[in-house]
């Protein structure tokens, strides 16, 4: 295949794979696509180890790093990371803490232990910038940012290192803002996507974004894409490639939590919900007792980012270790209904391409006739 992104990065297939698992990132890049490591959950020290491992196992193929530098979040003016964490923790209402502990007790989740969760993560500018610094010390080909346009100085710094920058956009207005700060690639992500996502469907969004940013800006189609036919549709709508995420949660190399994996494999496309119950911003997850509780009339409501995640950070490892399993959820898109087999990452790439070719062949036959 030959599109602008395959030429730009020297990859065989215009398939980008977002994953928090380094094994998946390396496997996809070795198979001819481009793996993109989600840096959110790693400290700078941990990220350094992850990227060093990828450097050794990617076979010299290009890969990327994805960070989260939100345009808006609570506490943006509160100082350094340590000060921000302390102040925000003090702002979490007792009502929310009681609701959470009552919910956990109702489902048999064990009391807190010394194994605490990471409270702040890379949800903020002050915590994401160290991740960017680490990433740019490695031979990455792409730096991607979610939840708004990246700061202009970050884009400039990436370009000084010869690294291309991608920005996720859920509507045409957001896409234009990304272009204004100098990003090279727009990931047009429809509401079908897992994790943080907007409310415009992929089929509508892609041509709107393509038209909004002009022919000089590369667009990747994202949001519910996990089949070759969907890949063909995205490119027919004007995209130069596809950005995928959810489908890598059930590959053989993935480190998806043991209690979440069966739920993903058995879910249908109707078993997800767009909720603020994890981060405080709308994100798509498996619909479970967790999401239903936060949407119920007894819920105290959501806290703004990053306070919602800070509230639940210690609860997440407890839920994964104990309880009746009903609270276990996971970020995933509506493509989960097609994720019912465990395959090697390379096989997923090849299946995407095979079905893409079948779709294009069928369309060519219709045109010829």
Image: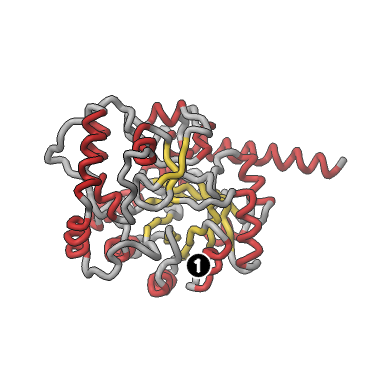
Residue at 56% from the left image edge and 43% from the top image edge: 225
Q: Residues within 10 Å of mark 1 (few under 14, many from 20)?
A: many
Residue at 61% from the left image edge and 45% from the top image edge: 231
Q: Quadrant of the C terminus?
A: top right
Q: Look at the image and tell me whether residue 254 can be seen.
A: no
Q: Which residue is mark 1?
A: 178
Measured along the vertical axis of the image, is residue 335 above or below residue 60?
Answer: above
Q: Position of residue 116 (x, y in %)?
A: 17, 44
Residue found at the very far left of the displayed protein:
114
Residue at 41% from the left image edge and 32% from the top image edge: 252
Residue at 53% from the left image edge and 40% from the top image edge: 349
Q: Position of residue 76 (x, y in %)?
A: 30, 67
Report the front residue among 114 and 154: 114
Q: Position of residue 114 (x, y in %)?
A: 12, 40
Residue found at the very far front of the displayed protein:
297
Q: For numbered disc 1, what is the local secondary structure?
A: helix
Q: Is 289 situated left or right of 364 in this image?
A: left
Colour setting? secondary structure
Q: Is 114 situated left or right of 272 in this image?
A: left
Report the front residue among 78 and 11: 78
Give the mark count: 1
Q: Look at the image and tell me whether residue 291 can be seen.
A: yes
Q: Position of residue 50 (x, y in %)?
A: 30, 50
């Amino acid at each position: 295949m030959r599109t602008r992104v395959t030429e730009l990065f020297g990859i065989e297939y215009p398939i980008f794979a977002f994953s928090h698992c380094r094994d998946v990132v390396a496997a996809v890049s070795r198979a001819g696509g481009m793996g993109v490591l989600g840096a959110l959950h790693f400290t700078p020290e941990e990220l350094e180890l992850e990227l060093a491992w990828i450097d050794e196992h990617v076979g010299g193929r290009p890969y990327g790093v994805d960070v989260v530098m939100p345009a808006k979040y609570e506490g943006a003016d509160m100082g350094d990371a340590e000060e921000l964490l302390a102040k925000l923790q003090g702002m979490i209402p007792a009502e929310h803490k009681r609701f959470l502990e009552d919910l956990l007790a109702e489902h048999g989740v064990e009391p807190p232990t010394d194994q605490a969760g990471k409270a702040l993560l890379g949800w903020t500018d002050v915590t994401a910038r160290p991740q960017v610094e680490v990433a740019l010390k490695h031979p990455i080909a792409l730096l991607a940012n979610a939840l708004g346009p990246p700061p202009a100085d970050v884009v400039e710094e990436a370009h000084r290192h010869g690294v291309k920058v991608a920005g996720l956009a859920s509507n045409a207005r957001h896409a234009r803002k990304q272009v204004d700060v100098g990003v090279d690639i727009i990931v047009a992500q429809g509401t079908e996507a897992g994790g943080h996502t907007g409310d415009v469907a992929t089929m509508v969004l892609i041509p709107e974004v393509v038209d909004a940013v002009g022919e000089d800006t590369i667009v990747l189609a994202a949001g519910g894409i996990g089949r070759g036919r969907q890949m063909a549709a995205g490119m027919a709508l004007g995209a130069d490639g596809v950005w995928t995420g959810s489908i890598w949660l059930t590959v053989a190399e993935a480190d998806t939590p043991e209690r979440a994996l069966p739920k993903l494999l058995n879910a249908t496309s109707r078993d997800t919900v767009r909720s603020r119950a994890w981060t405080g911003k709308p994100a798509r997850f498996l619909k479970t007792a967790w999401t239903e509780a936060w949407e119920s009339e007894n819920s105290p409501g959501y806290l703004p980012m990053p306070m919602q995640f800070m509230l639940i950070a210690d609860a997440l490892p407890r839920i994964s270790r104990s309880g009746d399993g009903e609270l276990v959820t996971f970020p995933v898109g509506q493509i989960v209904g097609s994720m019912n087999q465990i395959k090697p990452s390379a096989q997923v790439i090849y299946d995407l391409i095979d079905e893409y070719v079948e779709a294009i062949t069928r369309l060519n036959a219709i045109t010829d006739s």
